[in-house]
Amino acid sequence: MATAQEAQKFWVDKLTQKVFFVLFAKNLSYPKGNWILQPILTGCPGLEDFKLQESHRFGIEEAILQESESFEVKGRFNTCNLTPQTFYKVSFIIRMEKNAHGWEDPVNLRLVHPDGREEERKEKLKGKPENKWMEILVGTFTTFIDAGEIEFSMYEFGKRKKKGLAIFAAFIQPLPFRNN
């Protein structure tokens, strides 16, 4: 397992025997926008909802968007590191700072599967609770179809200045089995 000082962490759920993976903010890329990395605030509620123990959060940095018209955060991950024949979802763990503004337009979330298929959706961030970590779904995939590297991103290339979005990590977690 990686230590909390490193850029990613994984663990196996004792009940399901499925692998969970977290790519912390410093392991993601930020091709657009004015981002700063700073130590995470311990007083923000919500991280316990993501099966992250306090020891997993020690020394971790968050990325915070400073005033920018456009922004993008991206990640890549090889699905071969996950449990075979399993449904997974990719999410960003975010929070909106107290001084956040400019989020009238929805953000775009995109998942690119190993075969090049793209899954895209929009999410409104305006009105989300302040200073509470929350999960924003990017998309879903299966490890028996989507073996290889996935790419995921959140972006908005508007003309309105925005600020106050904090990124903790990208969270890759198994979903319950479903019959289609």
Image: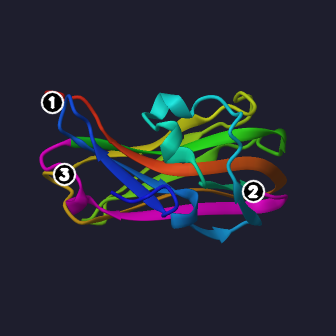
Which is more toward the observer, 44 or 171?
Answer: 44
| x then y, percent, for residue 34 | 77, 66
Q: Nearer the viewer, residue 140 or 54?
A: 54
Q: Which residue is mark 2?
A: 65
Residue 132 appears in which quarter of the rendering? top right
Is residue 66 in view? Answer: yes
In the picture, the quarter occupied by the C terminus is top left
Q: Which residue is mark 3?
A: 143
The residue type indicated by label 2 comes to: Leu
Tag 1: amino acid:
Asn
Residue 69: name its quadrant: bottom right
Query: Between disc 3 and disc 2, whose residue precedes?
Result: 2
Residue 66: x, y in percent? 81, 58
Q: From the viewer's perspective, is residue 143 above or below residue 54?
A: below
Helix, strand, or loop for circle 1?
loop
Q: Which residues are magenta?
A: 65-86
Q: Nearer the viewer, mark 2 or mark 1?
A: 2
Mark 3 element type: loop
Residue 19 vertical placement versus 159 (above, below): above
| Residue at image location 63% in from the left, 62% down from the top | 72
Q: Residues within 10 Å of mark 2 (few under 14, many from 20)?
A: many
85 or 113, which lies in front? 85
